[in-house]
Image: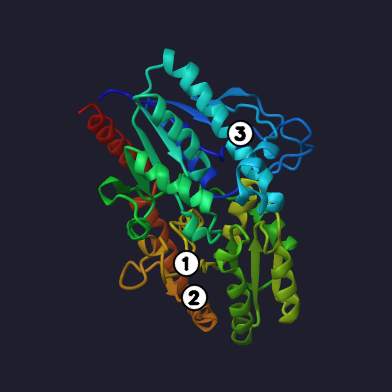
Amino acid sequence: MKKLKIAFFTWEYPPCIVGGLGTYSRDITKIFAEMGHKVDVFTLNPMRKGREECEYCERKHICELPVHEFYGDVEIHRPLIFDATSPLECISEELKRWGNAKSLFADIFTFNMLAASKFVNKLIFYRDFDIASVHEWLCAGAGMIIKDNTSLPVVFHVHSTEELRSNLSGMIKALEHKFAEKSDGIITVSYAMKDHLISIGYPEEKIHVVWNGINPKEVDPKKVKKKDVEKWRETHRISEERVVLFIGRLTGIKGVENLVRAFALVVERFPQTKLVIIGKGDEESKITKLVKELGIEDRVSLCFEFLPRKDVLANYKLADTCVFPSFAEPFGIVCLEAMAMEKPVVVASQGIVGFREQVINEGEEKCGVYINQFDINDIARGICEILENPEQAKEMGKKARKRVLENFTIKHTAKRTLEIYRSIIEGARK
């Protein structure tokens, strides 16, 4: 079967990682390349004149990334951006209301124009690309330009929507809906998301579902070093306590405030328990204040930073259970990682959440507990269900990893994605 040449547009790519999209982009492009396909990644270069540090990267120093390099067999293009805030403010009344965030939109706009220009005006003429794979609204501008200026089929990967992010920007919603109309196909991450997209007017006949996946060889409890776990045990000041872990972005939609309030109820029943929260976001000060107000500072460890991969895995290993109480979650790669690390999970089950498709809540294959993420008593109930039976919890963790191996590896994701790409390419030829 013919190997594909894929142009892959993503805002996040290592080392510039903000959330799950960066991890997904790294893993899926690596697998594509290992399968023999040619992948060109177009992604953010955070450096521009006047910027003193990288605002987007997990690194803690100035990012000096090359405009062109290879990550294994994956070719990476990072056009240098520039400050376009002033002219954009003249064009958009909404952007004036974005405050400090308007520089982010300007960076996104600039990246899209430069990436699309390099692709349309240069690369496409001497490389026989088969498809453009465009991820999130962050790259929708480039996707639309490619669609308007070439005959190449374009697929829109929808990992979330503006409606779910709760920002309700008219510009972003318009970008998402327009690109959905123009694209040759849409791939989203869960059946919950497919239903959501249909409900807000996306063309049902274009929508395909492909679950996200992870590399279980990397996320493996057997490969975590004991010294790394012990380092974090000391950092969190854990002796004999049971550990409840949350890892993720600290934004309102992730439900961390409800988790903290629920944990205050958990420690009444299980006083020798500690909540570990790891992540960055605009809820940091709010969470810190709430922990103090509830009087549980000695029961909570807060780590507001991006951690190296080995430290993330060490914290999973340290945990007794992982809790993800998002108000809305299209999929949730962190849940897969916890499951692959043999941890029983406590997950949101109400509304638009992909967790229900990952986690089995009952029967012989039970590997986690569903909760109503809007009810702090029910969150507490779910955590306590895990804590009250440690042996059963261990069995659930083993079944969790088994489920990941059978259904949610990055190879599963890549194979299904390529099948859809081929069908879209074939459809575009007719």
Point 47% across, 64% down: residue? 328
Identity, as a three-letter code, of the amino acid under mark 3? Thr
Residue 227 horizontal/vertical position (percent): 68, 52
Q: Residues within 10 Å of mark 1 (few under 14, many from 20)?
A: many
Q: Determine which residue is flagged by label 3.
A: 110
> Are dots 1 and 2 in contact, CB under 8 Å?
yes
The answer to whether one can see residue 384 in this image is yes
Alpha carbon separation for disc pair 3 and 2 = 48 Å
Q: Determine which residue is flagged by label 1.
A: 344
- Nearest to N terminus: mark 3 or mark 2: 3
The answer to whether one can see residue 43 in this image is no
* Residue at the top extreme of this rendering: 126
Alpha carbon separation for disc pair 1 and 2 = 7 Å
Alpha carbon separation for disc pair 1 and 3 = 43 Å
Identity, as a three-letter code, of the amino acid under mark 1? Pro
The local secondary structure at tag 3 comes to helix
In the picture, which quadrant includes the N terminus? Answer: top left
Report whether 427 appears left or right of 356: left
Point 30% across, 47% down: residue? 208
